[in-house]
Amino acid sequence: MQQQPNEVTLQKQGEVTLLGIKGDITAFSEPYLNDAYRNSNSQGAKKILFNFEDKAYINSGGIAVLIQVLAQTKRNNQLIGITGLSDHFKKVFHMVGITKFAAIHPSVDEALKAMSS
Amino acid sequence: MNQQTVEINLPNQLGYERVAMGSVAAFANSIGFPPDRIEDLKTCVAEACINAVQHGNKNRPDARVIVTMGFTDNVLHISVFDEGEGFKETPKEPDIVRIMNNLDPPLGFGVFLIKKLMDEFEFQKLPDRRNEVRMAMKLRK
């Protein structure tokens, strides 16, 4: 049962690099998230906002991939925000501790405002 | 198993956990579980299936993953069976600070989430050599 590839868009919104990530986040997402992060870095991103789809299925494999990307952002002293999550995955991200390293925002607009200040 | 037990027989391949997720969502919804608990159930059954595929059946294409679900005494019981050796002990809880500092591998989130989200979690090796992960969630009204 094949997973659809993730579609990732990269947009500069002021000083924040907005990564729009469509699709489920699983172990199969690794190349797409890593490419997106590399592309952000090549543009000198200091602040990155991950915008997931609220209907996305996220599993432990996807969480592991995301944490590996977050570990790189920590080493590179980048500010990270996350938005677009359903209430369920906000809870899951809090449980596993992702919120210690990346703030979860209720919307893109609110994230951009918080991350730009 | 009783007459109301549902059984799903899945290929040993990542992605098919979505079939179990859809089934448990429909089953729990028919019983009256609220949407937030159904989301918890979907995550837990998915994680148990992923563990069965990868760690139990070690990605063997000829192996199967069996999921059963039933509702008795106000409790939804789910079992996930694989053909592997099973857990020798409960995996330790992932420590995200150690993982972020490359001191631990990014593993163990599946069992961690099941333990957090379900009311009961246990595993056992069966006499027929299969491994069973059992989970339960109470319906609170």
Image (cartoon, coloured by chain):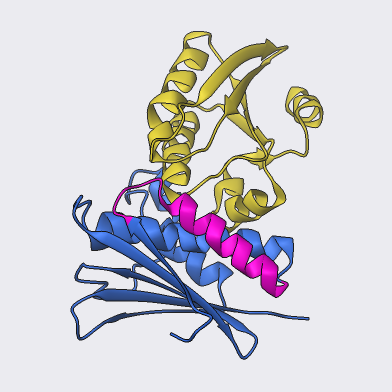
Chain colours: A yellow, B blue
- The correct choice, above or below, for A72 with respect to A16 in the image is below
- Left or right relative to B87: residue A89: right
Asked whether residue A77 appears in the rendered view, the answer is yes
Percent coordinates x, y for residue A76 in the rendering: 47, 26
Residue at the bottom extreme of this rendering: B73
- Left or right relative to A2: residue B140: right
Q: Nearer the viewer, residue A106 or B54?
A: B54
- Left or right relative to B21: residue B28: right
- Left or right relative to B16: residue B21: right
**Residue at horizontal 55%, vertical 64%?**
B24
* Residue B18 highlighted magenta (yes or no): yes
The magenta segment = B11-32
**Residue at horizontal 19%, vertical 71%?**
B85
Percent coordinates x, y for residue B106 in the rendering: 37, 49
Residue at the front extreme of this rendering: B3
Asked whether residue B94 appears in the rendered view, the answer is no
Q: Quadrant of the C terminus of chain B?
A: bottom right
- The correct choice, above or below, for A70 with respect to B18 in the image is above
